Amino acid sequence: MTEAILRNWIPLRRDLILHRRTLVLVAVMYTAFQAWFVTSFNNPMVWLVFNCIYFSFLTVTPLTADEKTQTLPWLCTLPVTRADLVRGRYVTSWALVLALYAVSVALAALMPGSDISPVWMLGPDRLLLVAGVVTFIIALLLPFTIRFGFTGMLLTLVAAQVLGGVMLVVAKITGGDLGSGISAAVGILREGIFALRGSLGVLGFQLALLVVLFLANWASYRASVWLFRRREF
Amino acid sequence: MEHVLDIERATKRYKGFTLDQVSLQLPRGYIMGLIGPNGAGKTTLIKLILNLIHRDGGTIRVFGLDNLASEAEIKSRIGFVPDEPRFHDDATLQSVASAVAPYYTHWDSKRFATLAGEFELPLKKNFKKLSHGTKTKFALALALSHGAELVLLDEPTTGLDPVFRRRLLDKLAGLLEGERTSVLFSSHITADLERTADFVTFVKNGRVVFSNTMDQVAQSWVVVKGGRETLDADARAFLEGVRVRAHGFEGLTSQADEARRRFGNGYVIERASLDDIMVLFGKEGSNDD
């Protein structure tokens, strides 16, 4: 156990040292942004989801910095396997997510005029929502970024934009109402979640969700390892 | 004899270039020079050892272990200096060293501090502000601070001033005093290798031409010099490389004794330097003048 913690601490420590300047910049920007947000956003749920999307992208910053400075080949000469390097990336990303969420909670508690309750933010459902949104983005983004670098991240974003554009065009051509379609899909998802929650019980549902999120991260990690092993420097 | 590096028919195929069935062995406690023109495959071979690229065939054993199956263990015992060291631009040298140190069980902070002082490294400066030579010195200090048993150097002397080049070579020779460390040193500055290497491997067009001790190379390779009119078809067939000049020719062969028997009076036969071998090998007699 101690050895496993140490093995994961070493890459996290490396990122904290080598990307210190970027991380400080990110932290300052994030804090300033959130300080404004917690006093200006009157819909906490929308704010929470937006916040998750925002800091999920921020966690990829150190990885794109490695690409920019072309230090990945050097990292691969260190006495670790490619799988270790990839795991380090996931550990760093999740550590940053935790740190940034802690900043948000602190700001919600301490900023004068804050409309968001820190107690509400720390409720199990909200924490699971945060973990779910972050998992969805990180699990999708990291494999592409690890394989293709900054270009991979951009391609993922562009692909999402193109998909949205195509859906709008299709809706326009077929005379469909995209807004209603999305609302219907969200409604079905919501009903499904409530049905599942009803049948499993609150605790059972939360545990099941945790397992699913863990498996999604694990699958993303395995995909990233497979992709990173194919890279040549 | 224990080999720290044992490469058997290592192959890597790229579009337009193949590192073709390269084999070599480096015994513990020796320096091997890897020579060859640009694009010969020296860096490709070093990258294969470090698993930075995937091999398409053959085996690579380091310290008796397969370099893929025991990657992390092997790398913990290797020090590597690339031809163009790249670390994080905005990090100070001290930061990079402290980020690297925990990866190595045998990291020796005192040794790093000593080397940093010896190489006059500005530890508080950001990496991007350093000259190429200082970057190489820093990479070398990192490579030598964790008790590496195999040091891989890819063109380390390129861009270094002559004073430090000499100091680097002395440092490498000093590493061997304990007979524990081995060095694989790629360079096209052959004078550096002649000064330090015990073994030399010559790679050209992705193939190993020879991999021998320096003594064997000195004994077997010679340059034959003679008048142009004496360079007949038999002589051309015998020589492994020929350069024809206005007033004569220079030919290279690895059969020194046979060359002395075959070419008698009217020829000059000299020991071939590594430079001669690099320049003349495979040359087919075109006039350079």
Image (cartoon, rainbow, N blue to C red):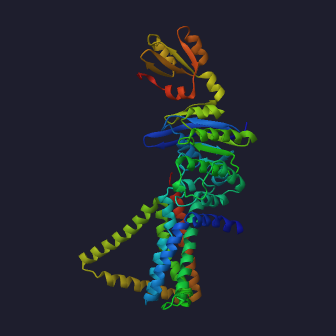
B274 vs A85: above or below = above
B204 vs A112: above or below = above
Q: Position of residue B184 (x, y in %)?
A: 62, 40
Residue at image point 61% right, 16% down: B257
Image quadrant occupied by the N terminus of chain B? top right
User: Furthest-top residue in view?
Assistant: B265
Residue at image point 48% right, 43% down: B13
Q: Quadrant of residue B5?
A: top right
Q: Quadrant of residue B26?
A: top right
A184 vs B280: above or below = below
Residue B5 shows in the view: no
Q: How many marks?
A: 0
A7 vs A79: above or below = below
**Closest to the observer, B281 or B7:** B281
Residue A99 shows in the view: yes
Q: Quadrant of residue A103?
A: bottom right
Q: Position of residue B263 (x, y in %)?
A: 55, 11
**Closest to the observer, B69 or B278:** B278
Residue at image point 69% right, 46% down: B149
**Closest to the observer, B211 or B81:** B81
Image quadrant occupied by the C terminus of chain B? top left
Q: Position of residue B144 (x, y in %)?
A: 67, 49
Residue at image point 47% right, 21% down: B242
Q: Position of residue B274 (x, y in %)?
A: 57, 28
Name the side, left or right, on which A107 lies relative to B218.
left
**Closest to the observer, B62 or A15:** A15
